[in-house]
Image: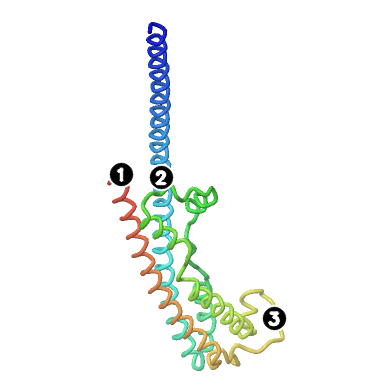
Amino acid sequence: MLEENKLSKYLLYAIGEIVLVVIGILIALQINAWNQTKEDIKKEEKFLLEIKENLIEDLQKVDTLLLANKRKLIRIDTAYHYLSLIDAQPMMGRKFSYQMPTITNLKLFVPTTVAFSNITATGKIDLLRSDPLRKEISRYYSDNPLDGVQNQIKVTTQTLLDNVAHQMINKTMMKAVTKRDFDVIPITEMKIHKDPKVLSGLFVLTNKTLEHNILLKATKTEVEDLVAKIDAYLKKT
């Protein structure tokens, strides 16, 4: 009986030791999990703040483009005005040419993707715990609705340049630029103001610039909304 009593106490002691070890392991695992969660939350916050910084940069880009487009539309209207006067005043061709650098200055919107590219490259996009917010951010960077009209603006701008450049070559223009005489047509024989390709090119560029403005404003609204949602989420967490 004494032997059995000692064995029972030993077994109870051993079981108690095992239970304590298991409890210790579980506590350690819980602490590690808690620390990891805390670290992930810090990384999530850092990621969202970097995304927000990039989005604010996008807002600045949009405002810059809207201002550039406003100037472009004014210059296109001015170009039409000078073209309409060339028959009576051939020297207006030079004033028309002064509008071209602004008209053909190609400024397009490209989102700043540094933060999003970094997080996706590391495969840690799931650090963002909010499914709706993660989806909205991913959708914003995966599809640029401005691509279509911006590609059209590229083509239209290049075509307009091709149609205008060679027609601006005349004796007066070359003399003013190079201080030399060339055997080219006199300024009075310029026909650029009667070229439907030039006139239609300006017309198409006007319409595409207006369409560009509409999409830029829609993008601005989307970005502002996304920034507000990031702020709200960070405040809540």
Measuring from the top left, give residue 92's x and y in whole percent. Answer: 50, 84
Residues tagged 1 and 2 counted as in contact (Cβ below 8 A): yes
Which of the two labelled residues, at mark 3 and mark 2, occupies the earlier sequence position?
Answer: 2
User: Quarter of the image holding residue 65?
Assistant: bottom left
Question: Crowding near pointer 1: few (<14 within 10 Å), some, many (20+)?
Answer: few
Residue at x 38% of width, y 18% of height: 16
Dot 2: element: helix
Does 146 appear above or below 34?
below
Does 49 appear above or below 144?
above
Residue at x 31% of width, y 50% of height: 233
Name the residue nearer the viewer: 27 or 97: 27
Indicate the amino acid at tag 1: Thr
Indicate the amino acid at tag 3: Asp
- Cα distance between the residues tagged 3 and 2: 68 Å
Dot 1: element: loop
Q: Which residue is mark 1?
A: 237
User: Quarter of the image holding residue 185?
Assistant: bottom right
Q: Which residue is mark 3?
A: 181
Q: Please state which of the two labelled residues, at mark 3 or mark 2, is closer to the viewer.
A: 2
